[in-house]
Structure formats: C-alpha cells, structure tokens
Image: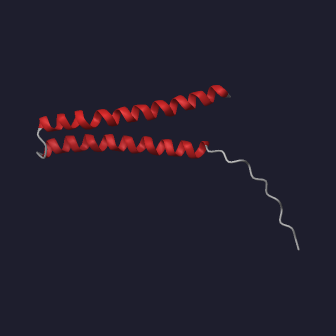
Amino acid sequence: MARSPSVEEAPYDPTRDQENVRANVAYGLLGTIVAFMCLALFGTFLGWIEVDGAIKLAAAMFSPVIGLFGAVMGFYFGERRGRQQDR
C-alpha cells in the first residue's frame, strides 16, 4: 500500500478566533446602541413615546449599554497593545 504523505499540523492558535468573537461582541453592542437610538428618535417623532419617556428610556438603556461597549473596547485595545509590546 502507498503511504500518504505526513502532514504536520501547527499547534492551535486561538488568536484569530478571539479576534472574531471580540469583533462580533463589539458589533452587537454597537447595533444595540443604534437600535435604542432609533427607537427613541423614531418613537418620539411618530408619537409612540413622549419626549419625557424618550429621555427616561435613554437614561435607563443607553448608559449601561454604552458602559459595556466602553469596557469591551477598552479590553480589546488594551489586550492588543499588550500583545504588541510583548513582541
């Protein structure tokens, strides 16, 4: 029988997968912020929400989501910076 050529596999490097997951989380949070903004703006313009209600919605919803977005982005860029300094 003929032998198949041996294939040497490189060890698994999770860096690419980590980058993809972090990017997807950041895009998801950014999409959530945009969706809340659209809901508040269009809801106000279309008369679904009063201006006071839109302000309360913004205070209750935007602050935590923007805080999460800032934490994710800070972690992402902080880790990238640390990896670049290790080189």
The structure's colour scheme is: secondary structure
Quadrant into which the N terminus falls: bottom right
Hey, which residue is sitting farthest bottom in the picture? 1
For image coordinates 23% across by 33% down, the residue present is 59
For image coordinates 62% across by 30% down, the residue present is 83
Q: Is residue 2 left or right of residue 14?
A: right
Q: Position of residue 55 (x, y in %)?
A: 18, 34
The image quadrant of residue 56 is top left
Q: Is residue 85 left or right of residue 19?
A: right
Q: Is residue 78 left or right of residue 50?
A: right
Q: Is residue 5 above or below residue 85?
A: below
For image coordinates 24% across by 36% down, the residue present is 60
Q: Position of residue 76 (x, y in %)?
A: 50, 34
Q: How many marks do you count on the picture? A: 0
Hey, which residue is sitting farthest right in the picture? 1
Q: Position of residue 65 (x, y in %)?
A: 33, 37
The residue lying toward the viewer, choosing from 19 and 41, is 19
Q: Is residue 22 left or right of residue 45?
A: right
The image quadrant of residue 86 is top right
Q: Is residue 58 above or below residue 24?
A: above
Q: Position of residue 87 (x, y in %)?
A: 68, 28
For image coordinates 14% across by 42% down, the residue present is 45
